[in-house]
Image (tube, helix red, strand yellow):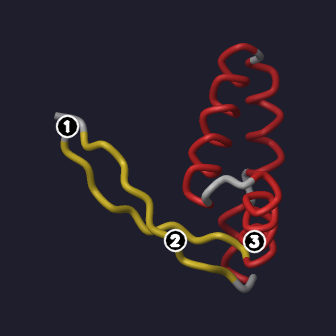
Amino acid sequence: MQVKRVEIEVEDALHAAVQRFAQRTGMAYEVLCVALMREMLERFERQPADLEDFLRRHQRTQLALEGAEHQELSIVVPVPE
């Protein structure tokens, strides 16, 4: 499987919250991020209404990032073959 590195922006407040949660749980920051993504995706597959609600609430996330202090993070994602 091929992978590529993708840069993402995360609000400082969210970054700090994830760091605190990772420290509290003893999980590495990166492992926690993957676990949270997996958990949410599984939830959305089980409960499609939750996905619709999520999309409504976060449709302006990119606009919010443009005006907020943020961290740039790198993640590695698989590249379709």
Look at the numbered disc 1 and give the secondary structure of its residue: loop
Q: Earlier in the sequence, mark 3 or mark 1?
A: 1
> What is the quadrant of the C terminus in the image?
top left
Viewer-nearest residue: 72 or 18: 18
In this rendering, would 53 be left or right of 75? Answer: right
The image shows residue 66 at horizontal and vertical percentages of 66, 79
Which mark, by number, is residue 73? 2
Residue type, numbered disc 2: Leu
Q: Residues within 10 Å of mark 1 (few under 14, many from 20)?
A: few
Which residue is painted at 27% across and 56% down in the image? 4
Which mark, by number, is residue 23? none
* Closer mark to the observer between disc 3 and disc 2: 2
Residue type, numbered disc 1: Met
According to the picture, the residue beneath numbered tag 1 turns out to be 1
Look at the numbered disc 2 and give the secondary structure of its residue: strand
Which residue is painted at 66% across and 53% down in the image? 27
The image shows residue 18 at horizontal and vertical percentages of 74, 62
